[in-house]
Image (cartoon, grey):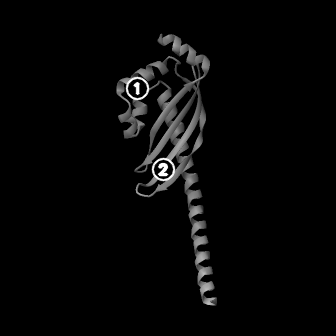
Amino acid sequence: MRRVLYVLGSLFLAIIAIGALAIGYAAWNGQALDAESKAYVDAAIPAITSNWSEAELMNRATPELRASTSPEEVDQLFQTFSRVGHLVVYKGSSGQSLMSYVAGTGKTISASYVAKASFQNGDATIRIGLLKRSGQWLISNFNVRFDSAVAARLRQMST
């Protein structure tokens, strides 16, 4: 009986040690991924929005994002966005990365950020989603929301 308790206790301690190491690794790696993804977002958003460049977005887009939008749709969207003018002040982003493991599909590294920016004719909130594939961050989602006054002016201009 004593031997069984000794073996079970040792096994329990080993499981706890492995769990602690896994949590420590995830936390250390997670901080690095957060810094890396934030730097990517803080470089990508000004590159895309300074002159509302479709090419800058599509060069950074996942294949799924490119496949889900036609060049005409992106062109029309960016023509609308360009009416708010050039980027005046990029106020930075906040968000984080996420590492997940799913049976059958493996490891996925993603990130989600929200950024604020001021343009010649108003302010916007930009939500951006990222995926890391083959060591490279790619944009999986790009959403721009203008403040209500700017949105109203854009609707007026398009009618």
* Amino acid of disc 1: Val
Circle 2 — which element?
A: strand
Q: How many marks?
A: 2
117 versus 101 height, above or below: above
84 versus 9 height, above or below: above
Decide which of 7, 130 is in the foreground and name it: 7
What residue is shown with label 1?
A: 74
Dot label at residue 20:
none
Residue at screen point 50% across, 39% down: 129
Q: Give whichever of discs 2 and 1 has the lower sequence position.
A: 1
Q: Measured from the top left, where is residue 140 in percent x and y?
A: 45, 39
Q: Measured from the top left, where is residue 62 in percent x and y?
A: 40, 40
Residue at screen point 43% across, 32% down: 57
Task: Using the numbered discs, state the Cα–Cα distance from disc 2 to disc 1 in whole angstroms.
Answer: 26 Å
Q: Are marks 2 and 1 in contact (CB under 8 Å)?
A: no
Residue that lies at the very extreme toward the front in this rendered image: 1
Q: Measured from the top left, where is residue 71 in percent x and y?
A: 35, 27
Residue 145, picture quadrant: top right
Q: Measured from the top left, where is residue 134 in percent x and y?
A: 40, 50
* Amino acid of disc 2: Ile
Circle 1 — which element?
A: helix
Give the class, few, some or many, for how many residues have Cα within 10 Å of label 2's Cα (few <14, many ≥20). Answer: some
Dot label at residue 109:
2
Residue 115, picture quadrant: top right
Residue at screen point 62% across, 89% down: 1
Residue 65, picture quadrant: top left
